Image (tube, rainbow, N blue to C red):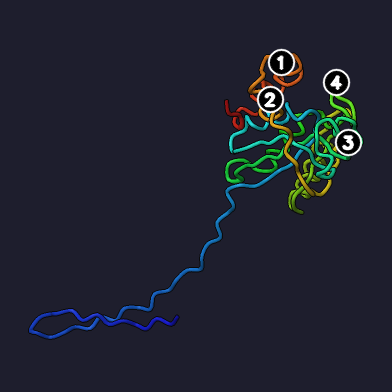
Amino acid sequence: MHIRNLKIGICALAGSVLAITMPTPTFAAPVPVQAKTATAVFAGGCFWGMEAVFEHLKGVSEVVSGYSGGNQATAHYDLVGSGTTGHAESIKVSYDPSQISYSQLLKVYFLVAHDPTQLNHQDPDWGTQYRSAIFFVNPEQKRNVETTIAELNKSHAFTKPIVTQVVPFKDFYAAEGYHQNFIARNPNYPYVVVNDLPKIEHLRKQFPVLYKQ
């Protein structure tokens, strides 16, 4: 709506009135507000350890263990464990991009959370359900992943080739309740002590600025 110039009369000396012309106010266009929460989906071995590592990152608000790569009808632990469903044990990470970037998440994923050079297994766990995979949710994430892998290859960060799948995100299905926050609830579980707690300590030492207790 057009706003006219306004004149405000002010009583002045000798009974005269001075008229002051006010400029037409201008209104700046709304500044887009960056989304406070973004999503990343990763797979790389048992989701217990993956979940625990990312839960210890500043800027991460939630990590959910689940399944991605297959369909809803087969998103059940016993079926996924057969290695025939197309699913990978995965995590969905909700984070604030103003506090931690997707690039930083990728560095933690590649250098702490798992070994991206192991094909269809992670240490004691074997099968396609334990494969290394990144499910990108938009083209920007895809470019970021490709750039990170190229940098790691160029720096010879690993002695073997990176075999991580980089595929579009389709769906994510939360795992059964007893898998959620498994390490926090079972810190003395033998598998956790041997395979997962060392990753959390590695995170604390390698990325102290990102680590939260």
1 sits left or right of 123 in the view: left
- The kind of secondary structure element at disc 1 is loop
9 sits left or right of 155 in the view: left
Which circle marks residue 163 in the picture? 3
Mark pair 1, 4: CA separation: 15 Å
Q: Which image quarter is the N terminus in? A: bottom left
Which circle marks residue 189 in the picture? 1
**Residue that appears at 74% across and 52% down:** 140
- The kind of secondary structure element at disc 2 is helix
122 sits left or right of 102 in the view: right
Mark pair 1, 2: CA separation: 9 Å
Q: In the rendered structure, which amino acid carries the disc numbered 4?
A: Pro
Instruction: Tell which circle, 3 or 1, labels the residue nearer the N-terminal end.
Output: 3
Mark pair 3, 1: CA separation: 29 Å
Note whether 187 is above or below 75 in the view shown.
above
Which circle marks residue 182 in the picture? 2
Q: In the rendered structure, which amino acid carries the disc numbered 3?
A: Val
